[in-house]
Amino acid sequence: MNEGVEWALHSCLNLAWMEGKAVTATRLAAHYDLPSAYLNKQLQTLVKAGILTSTSGPKGGFRLAREPGEISVLDVVVALEGAEDAFRCEQVLRDAPGGRADVDYRKACLISQTMRSAELAWRRELAARTIADLRRDVEQRHPGAGERTRTALTTPKS
């Protein structure tokens, strides 16, 4: 998974604290000392996926397109990484000694079954967690994090 997923999830969390105010990619990137152009590319991908909206102009920037409770972590991951499974069974057993052309090894192979089971568990976990859940958990663990982030992203740089 590329680093843009981490950056995008942090950006979505930060935008959840912004109470609908737009924040530029440059400002979000500076918050974590990230490359602005690369973060902007990730954020534009989230716009195309309907997770964020963007507005141009002096008061422009990015906002969440939906309520934080309606955006799962999996939504962000799939938007950036695609919906394909992380493991793809190439059915190498078909060409191994004793392999058979008439067997679907994606279903018969224990390695394939194990990897598919893990993939489904991972996806279920990410689908069950929303940006609102992350916001709540961060605020419980780090009281004032939302206010500090909001202040940092809205205070003019000197």
Image (cartoon, rainbow, N blue to C red):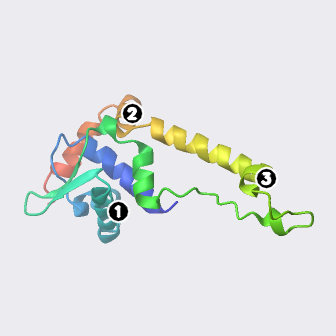
Q: Residue 146 carries which label?
A: none
Picture residue at 60% right of the left edge, 40% below the top: 121
Q: Earlier in the sequence, mark 1 or mark 2?
A: 1
Q: Going by the image, does 49 lie left or right of 6?
A: left
Which residue type does callout 2 highlight? Asp
Q: Going by the image, does 2 lie left or right of 12?
A: right
Picture residue at 25% right of the left edge, 61% below the top: 25
Residue 6 seen in the figure: no
Q: Which mark is residue 133?
A: 2
Quarter of the image with the C terminus in it: bottom left
Q: Position of residue 59 (x, y in %)?
A: 8, 57
Q: Going by the image, does 104 lie left or right of 11?
A: right
Q: Which of marks 3 and 1 is nearer the N terminus?
A: 1
Q: Is mark 2 on a helix, strand or loop?
A: helix
Picture residue at 92% right of the left edge, 67% below the top: 97
Q: Is mark 1 on a helix, strand or loop?
A: helix
Q: Residue tagged by mark 1?
A: 42
Please tell me how crowded label 3 is: few (under 14), some (14-19), or many (20+) other residues with Cα within 10 Å. Answer: some
Circle 3 or circle 1, nearest the eye: 3
Q: Do the residues labelled 3 and 1 touch (CB within 8 Å)?
A: no
